[in-house]
Amino acid sequence: MRRTVIALICAIACAAPAAASEFRVPAGFTPSTAFTDADRTLIGDLEDYMNSVQTMEAEFIQVADGGHYQKGQVWVERPGKIRFEYDAPARFMIVANHGWVNLQDHSLQTTSTVSL
């Protein structure tokens, strides 16, 4: 059960948003692993900003193979707290904090708790 819940959280956190299916690589774009000084500065600034963020809230769309999708909201609070709430018809919530993961299924009126 623990691995299932952890795998579910990882799948949710890594799921591609619907907008990703609309992403197109610009014509003539060639990927490069060589960063310029300007790139390194920009990356450093972005890292500083992301490290300063303590809370975050967003709506998400989780897309599965075959085009099925589910919408919901996600909240993140540092350090170590995350909450996913899925809209109907799924109606479940995943909360991870203080070394525990809770999966609450509102439709079945059940709660599963797993230690990380």
Image: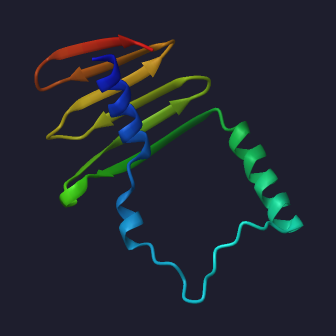
Q: What quarter of the picture does the N terminus occupy? A: top left
Q: In the shown orientation, is residue 28 left or right of residue 45?
A: left
Instruction: Give me the residue at 47% from left, 28% from top.
Output: 82
Q: Residue furthest front?
A: 33
Closer to the camera, 49 or 37?
Answer: 37
Query: Number of labelled discs?
Result: 0
In percent of width and height, residue 81 lies at 51, 24
What's the image's color scheme? rainbow
Instruction: Give me the residue at 29% from left, 25% from top.
Output: 4
Instruction: Give me the residue at 41% from left, 64% from top.
Output: 20
Q: What quarter of the picture does the C terminus occupy? A: top left
In percent of width and height, residue 99 lies at 49, 13
Q: Residue furthest bottom?
A: 28
In percent of width and height, residue 35 lies at 80, 66
Q: In the shown orientation, is residue 56 left or right of residue 89?
A: right
- In the figure, 50 relative to 29: above or below? above
Closer to the camera, 26 or 95?
Answer: 26
In percent of width and height, residue 3 lies at 34, 22
Give the quarter of the image for residue 113.
top left
Closer to the camera, 69 or 25?
Answer: 25
Instruction: Give me the residue at 34% from left, 61% from top.
Output: 18
- In the figure, 114 relative to 66: above or below? above
Q: In the shown orientation, is residue 36 left or right of residue 105?
A: right
- In the figure, 112 relative to 15: above or below? above
Q: Residue furthest right?
A: 37
